Image (cartoon, rainbow, N blue to C red):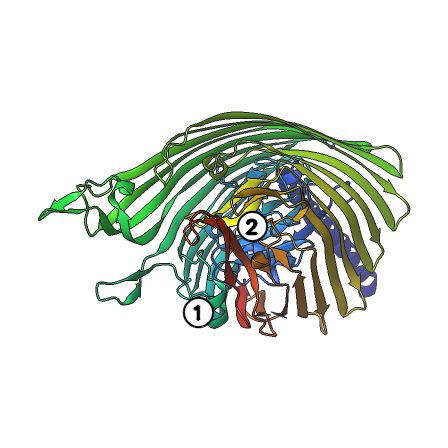
Amino acid sequence: MKKVLFYPIMLMLSISLNAQKKQTDSINSDVEKLDEVLVKSVRVEADLPITHSNLSKEELATRNLGQDIPILLNYLPGVVTTTDAGTGVGYTYIRVRGSDASRVNVTLNGIPFNDAESQGTFWVNLPDFASSIENLQLQRGVGTSTNGSGAFGASLNLLTDAVSKEASAEISNSFGSFGTRRHNVKFSTGLLNDHIEIAGRLSAIASDGYVDRASSDLKSYFLQGAYLDDGTLIKAVAFGGHEITYQSWNGIDQETLDNNRTFNPAGQYTDEDGNTRFYDNEVDNYKQDHYQLHWNQKYNNQWSSNLGLNYTYGRGFFEQYKEDENFEDYDFIPIILGGETINTTDLVRRRWLDNDFYVINASANYKNNILDIDFGAFYSYYDGDHFGEVIWAQNAGGSQIRDNYYFGNGKKDEFTIFGKTTYRINDKWSAFLDLQGRFVGYETSGLTSDRVALEVDERYDFFNPKLGATFQLNTSNQLYTSYARANREPRRSDFENGVDTAERLNDIELGWRFKTNKTTINTNIYYMWYKDQLVLTGALDDVGAPIRTTSGESYRLGIEIDANIILSDKFTIKPNVALSTNKNKDFITSRDGDLVNLGDTNISYSPDIVAGNMFIYQPIKNLQLGFLSKFVGEQYMGNIDSETSKLDSFFINDLNIVYEIKNIPVFKSIVLTGLVNNVFDSEYVSNGYFFTFDDDFSNPGTITTVEGAGFYPQAGINFLVGATLKF
């Protein structure tokens, strides 16, 4: 009798548990799909004819010990990263296909992150942001239409933490070389009453830096409130950071690199006794807060929409000790004392930014078995003040505290409309069409930091078509081709240097994707040709920002291959290589007082080879060992193929260990992570600058072009270890 009852009861229990699991999986799936709507309008799916790479939260977590996002992306194809302090904490930068960060379009939940005026991305303003990322996609080349400044080398879009159904909490701590440490706490309430979730994170990161005094004191937060109901997801997200970093953007010359590679000249001055000293507060101090509201609505199996609102508030300064500054540069009044005129002084100045950025972003999607259509509109408005103040002066020259010695303003508005269609022609063929109209206005007033009037009133109207096709040869092989055009307006510093010409890029991509159960290979060939490309000259302005010049016609031609190969249940390798040639055509420069046509020259900061590999070994279920390698070929920091401007190739290797302890009291699990960077202690330089100037003093009556270079050395062998306690 007991056996007769036992089987029906077990059967009913099994059905009940399976039904409950299916319901839970269904809820999780619905939440995930609604979350993905935030970035659908700027992303592409796996089989679209756009060259791209994806990274998940889990992949990022294996090496996330406080280093900035560019460093975590270092092993993607065609990517080169660098950092001022030499450690991956503080100011970090990314280049993709030789294009610098100002030409890589970045969006956070579909909202532009690039600064509207400089077009740069300053990850130091969002420290530990990788801890709040659900996933990301890096599109190389022009990619699909996105919001904000056009992608001229790549676009990177990030989706922040998805809504969690289950309650959770975790505490993470990590420590490492150069006094580096990170502490964060995260939590999620899970879905309360199946509708509401509140989640958040607080982080603190500090480091002394590899370079002398290149310290970082970074704090950040992330807070999310979400409401979920049948087909509706409303998310209010607030995140931001406060960074204080000692300046290390000056670099060092070759002699110093050879003899004292950690030397940092920032803040250096000579006291009254002739002793060399360093100002203790030569810092960059900036706060940035982002407030986003997203409403995602799924109406039925075909229609969905997304409405996003954003406000970003940024404010901060960098502080400098300056010696023997002229009164006239600060609007000081000369001092007459005992018949002697004093018109120079030592002083401490601050150069400020104070800006507001507003965005409204709306899109809709229609999808059935044949068509996938996205269309929408985007509007943004930026208002930024630039001003300087002297907070101390040995001789004040009649100035008052908090007087502005310069003040300027920049306003930028942008309106974009787009439509994207993927049409499944049959089981083999699909076609892709993407049309975007982008309309930008930029207006400035007041003075630059050099107290020069900057009056700009420009409008740019851009039409950016993109089209392509995908052919599914069989279950394992897929071919694609695409053409895309991008246009891009100059940035504020370009206008300061007299450049107001928009750039144009045409990009052709041919790709092959191969996929089996154990092997994935992506191969693509690209040809990107530019009109009036603004290439980096190699030189820096007085705040460490790169100076650009128009190169006329130029091109980038390359092939990229990346793979994921499962050798066995325990071994996986993920190699990639990017081979390219990057040329300015008929490049004209000034040399020895004359204009000279150098013919075809190499585009600055564009190595011909970038290769990487991840060798992953998993001896047991909860232990993963990774050996990561990166090679970057030699590159020129200028466009005139000068040997002075050459950066040597470098090859670095990292060791990554992740071990998760499960089935323990109190905690869901404990994750132990170790990272040894540059395990072979290579002395390498990943970035620098190059400059020329005309010398007409050495030999009166003649002009001689003099060249010089500076370098940013990176750390030798160093380590980070961390533990995450999950509740």
Q: Secondary structure at mark 1?
A: helix
Residue at mark 2: 190
Mark 1 surroundings: few (<14), some (14-19) or many (≥20) residues within 10 A: few
**Viewer-nearest residue: 39 or 401:** 401
**Mark sitting earlier along the chain (1/2):** 1
Residue 499: x, y in percent? 52, 34
Disc 1 marks a residue whose amino acid type is: Gly
Q: Is residue 229 left or right of residue 345?
A: right
Residue at mark 1: 179
- Toward the right, the furthest residue is 474
Disc 2 marks a residue whose amino acid type is: Gly
Taking the spot 76% from the left edge, 70% from the top edge, the residue there is 570
Residue 689: x, y in percent? 52, 54
Taking the spot 34% from the left edge, 59% from the top edge, the residue there is 267
- Toward the left, the furthest residue is 338
Taking the spot 72% from the left edge, 50% from the top edge, the residue there is 581
- Whole-angstrom CA distance, mark 1 to mark 2, is 36 Å
| Any part of residue 451 in sight | yes
Q: Is residue 129 left or right of residue 581?
A: left
Q: Is residue 391 left or right of residue 58?
A: left
Quarter holding the C terminus is bottom right
Quarter holding the N terminus is bottom right
